[in-house]
Amino acid sequence: MSFSEVTCIRHDAHEFLNFLLNELVDILEKGSHAAKTLTASSPEKVANGSCNGHANGVKEPLVTWVHKNFQGILTNETRCLRCETVTARDETFFDLSLDIEQNSSITSCLKNFSSTETLNAEDKFFCDKCCSLQEAQKRMKIKKPPHILVIHLKRFKYMEQLGRYKKLSYRVVFPLELKLSNTIEKTDSEYSLFAVVVHVGSGPNHGHYVSLVKSHNHWLFFDDENAEIIDESAVQTFFGSAQDYSSNTDHGYILFYESLAASKS
C-alpha cells in the first residue's frame, strides 16, 4: 500500500478501515485465483477434466478470513401497509455506521438504527403484489452478527446552516460488555470491547488519531510511536462531552467488539 493510496482517502480512520479491509479481500482473492489457476493447469487436473478448480464449472465465492471475522448480514424488511406483504432484502456489512445523539449510548444508537420508518408521500414503496406505489413501513435488522463487530460513530455531520461539516462531540457511552439484542436471532449476541479508535481534535478537517487496545487483560494506549498501559476505567474518558462546549476533544470514533461465543470456540 503506497502513501499516495493512503492520502487519497482524506486521512479519515473509518474510510481507511474500509479501504484496508476491501484491499485485503482483493489481495486474498487474487492469490486464491492464481493458486487455483496453477493447480488447474497441472497434468493431473487436465487429465481428470477439471476446469479452474470449480465443480461443474460453477465458481464459488471465496470466503476469506476477512469475511469470516468481520462480515455480518443485514436484512432490510419493507411491509406494505395495504396488503401487509413483507419484502426482505439481505446485504452484507463489515461495519455499522450509527447516528449519534447527545448523552446517549451504543444500545440506544443501535435501537435507532433498527427503528421502524414509515415511507409515504414522495417516498412511497412500489409493492409488487399491489403493482403500485403504497405507504409502507421499513426497518433494518441484523440477520447474522459478525465475529468482530465494528461500530462507527458518525461524529462528522454536514450542517446546512454552516455549509460545512462539523464534529459532534456528543457523549456516547460504549460499554465494555455489549448485548446485541436488535437481531433476528431469538437470543442476544454478547460482545466484549477490545479496541477503540479515538479522534482527537475539535473539527473534521484537522486532528489526530490515537487508539486503545486490550491485550492479555491489560488496556494499552497507542499514540504514534508511544505506548503505555492504562487503567480500564480510563476508557470511559473517551465517551465524549456532555456539554456542547468543552475542552475535551478526545472522542471515541470506531469501536471494535469481539463475540464472546467466538472467543470461547
Image: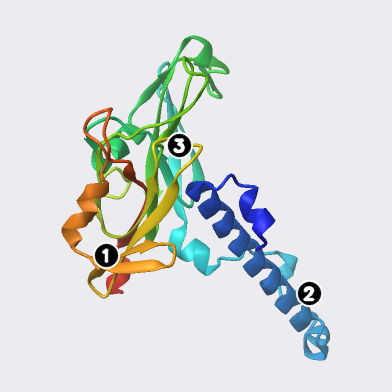
* Element on which disc 3 rests: strand
* Element on which disc 1 rests: helix
CB under 8 Å between discs 1 and 2: no
Q: CA distance from mark 3 to mark 1?
A: 26 Å
Q: Residue furthest left?
A: 233
Q: Which quadrant of the figure contains the C terminus?
A: bottom left
Q: Which quadrant of the figure contains the N terminus?
A: bottom right
The tag earlier along the polypeptide, 3 or 1, is: 3
The tag earlier along the polypeptide, 1 or 2, is: 2
Query: Label 1 neighbourhood size at 10 Å, few (<14), some (14-19), many (20+)?
Result: some
Image coordinates for residue 177, horizontal then vertical, percent: 21, 56
Image coordinates for residue 34, horizontal then vertical, percent: 74, 75
Please name the residue shown 36% across and 35% down the image: 113
Q: Is residue 47 left or right of residue 163?
A: right
Based on the displayed image, in which of its 4 quarters is residue 116 positioned?
A: top left
* Element on which disc 2 rests: loop
Query: Label 1, on which residue?
Result: 260
Query: Label 2, on which residue?
Result: 51
Q: In front here: 185 or 213?
A: 213
